[in-house]
Image: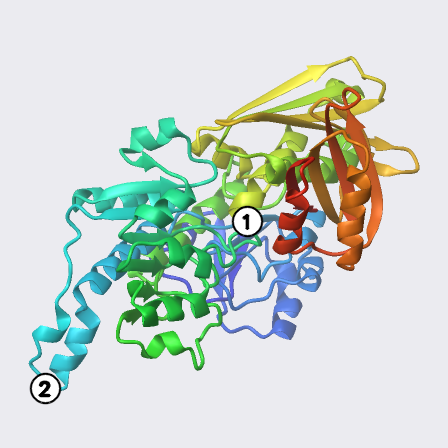
Amino acid sequence: MFKVLITDPLSELGIQKLLEAPDVEVTQMPGLSPSDLLAVIGEYDALLVRSQTQVTAEVLAAGKRLKAVGRAGVGVDNIDVNAATEAGVVVINAPDGNTISTAEHSFAMLMAVSRNIPQAHKKLTEGIWDRKSFQGVELNGKILGVVGFGRIGTEVAKRAKAFNMQVLAYDPFLTEERAAKMGVTHATLDEIIAKADYITVHTPLTKETRHLISSKEFAKMKNGVRIINCARGGIIDEKALYEAILTGKVAGAALDVFEVEPPVDNPLIGLPQVVVTPHLGASTVEAQENVAIDVSEEILKVLRGEPFKNAVNLPSIPAHVLEKIEPYFSLGERLGQFLAQITVGSIQEITITYSGDLSEVDTAPLTRTVLKGVLSFRLGEGVNYVNAPLLAKTRDIAVLEQKSSLNRGFMNLLTLTIRTNLETKSVSGTLLNGYGARIVKIDDYGIDVAPEGYLLYIHHNDRPGVIGRVGTILGSNDVNIATMQVGRRDIGGDAIMMLTVDKPVSAELLDSLGELPEIKSVTQVEL
C-alpha cells in the first residue's frame, strides 16, 4: 500500500481516484502545522498540497519514503524544488487545469468593460435607473490584440473569433504558420499597440515582461483602447495606466491581478472606467476539480512506476550518465539563456550539437536543460526540465540534436543554433579546467568569456578607437568594465565585443552606445 498525505483543502471529486485506488491509503490533514508535518511526513510515499503548505528542504529530508510531491495548481513557489530533486523526489503540478477558467474570465472581463456591466449593476442596486451614463460598445468587428499566445491566449482568441472580432496575436515563439492555422493574424507587439481596440495580456511575469505596457506604449495606442489583464500584476504599468485613463487615451480597463495583492490605496480601484476582480481567474468549481484530478492522476502514475508528464524537476538519470553530463547542465542552460537574449524574431528551429566526448553519452537530459534556458527567457519560471520539450512542440519549434566525434580543439563542445523567421545565430561553449564554463564562439567569431553576470554584446565595425569610445561612455556613467573580449573575421570588417560589467546598464545608456557610428547593435544580457 502507498500512503498519501493531503495537507491543504482539495476537491473531494478531484481526489476521487486516489480515494478509490486499491493500492493507496489517503490521509487528509488540512491545516497541519509545520512541526506536525515534520513529525508525520516520514510515514508517507506522496504529499499533496495547494499553496498553504510549505514543502521545505527540512520537510523533504524528513520524508524518507517520499517519492512525489503534488501541487494542485500551476505555481510551485511553496515547494523547494531543488531540494526535492536532490532527494530524488518528483514534483508534480497541474499546468492545464485552469486554462479554460482563466480564458473565460478574461473574456467575461472584456465584455464587462465594453458594456459597463458592474457599474450599471451597482447604480441600479442603489435605486437609480440610469441608462444614459452606461452606453457601451460592440465587440463585433473590433480588433483584439492578444499579447502572449500560449494555452490561455489561444483560448481567448477562439472566443473572440466567435464574436466576429479580428485577432492580432503576438508571442515570441508564435510563427506565421501557427497563427494562420489558428485563424489569427501574426503581429508584432508594436503592431498590436498601434492597431488594437482591445489589448489582453497572457504572458508570464518576467524581467522582460515587467511593465511591458507602460507610458510609451499607451502614447502609441488608439484613443479609446480598452485593456484587460487576467495574467499577472506588473505586466501593465499601473501608474501609466491610471494616467492614460485620466487623459482619455484608455477608455476602460478590466483587471483581475495587481502589482501588489491585495491592492491597498490603488487609485485604479476607484476609477469608474475600471472593472476589477480579486484574482478570480482560476476560481471556478471546475478549475479546482481539474487541478486536483490532474495532480492525483500524476501522483498515482509516479507511485505505480508508470509514465508521467507534469513533473517540474529533472527526472532521474542513471548514475554513470549523470557523472559525465552533470557538469554541463549549468553551461547548457546558460548558453540557451544567452542565445535567446541576443536573437531576434520568432524561433522556428533549435539545433543542439554535441562534439567530442559528449557525443558518446545519452545527452537527452542535457538537451532539456538547453531548451529550458532558451524558453525560460520568454516564458518565465513556468518552464522546467520536464515540460520544455512539450512547450517547444506546442509552439511548432523544431528541436534537432546532432552529435560529432570531432572535438574542434576542445575535449567537449556544446553548440547551440537558433533559427528564427529573421535570422540564424549560434553560440558554442565548453568547460575549461581551472576556468569553468566558457563561451568560446558566437557565430563565426572566436571569443573567451564566462557566461555569468551582466554582459554587453555589441556588434560593430572594426574601426580604430571604437573600443575606447565604448569604454569612455560606460566609465563616464559609472559603469565598471570587468572583462572585455573582441572577436573579428577580417581587419576593418564586422566584429563583436563582449563586455562583463558590474551592474545593469540603463536603457538610456544602451541607446547612447547604439548612437556611435560604428555600432550596429547593443544587447544587454543577464545570466
**Residue 215 x/y as whole percent:** 45, 61
Dot 1 falls on a residue whose secondary structure is helix
Q: In the picture provided, is 227 more to the left or to the right than 344? A: left
The residue depicted at 28 percent of the width and 69 percent of the height is 275
**Residue 127 x/y as whole percent:** 9, 86
Q: How crowded is the residue under tag 1: few (<14 C-alpha within 10 Å), some, or many (20+)?
A: some
Q: Amino acid at mark 1?
A: Gly
The residue depicted at 83 percent of the width and 41 percent of the height is 484
Q: In the picture provided, is 48 more to the left or to the right than 140? A: right
In the image, residue 468 sits, relative to residue 220, either above or below, namely above
User: Is residue 311 in view from this perspective?
Assistant: no
Q: Amino acid at mark 2?
A: Gly
Q: Residue beneath label 2, please?
A: 127
Judge by depth and name the residue closer to the eye, 301 or 269.
269
User: Is residue 516 in view from this perspective?
Assistant: yes
Q: Residue beneath label 1, please?
A: 380
Q: How crowded is the residue under tag 2: few (<14 C-alpha within 10 Å), some, or many (20+)?
A: few
CA gap, disc 2 and disc 1: 47 Å
Check if mark 2's residue and mark 1's residue have beta carbons within 8 Å: no
Judge by depth and name the residue closer to the eye, 370 or 15.
370
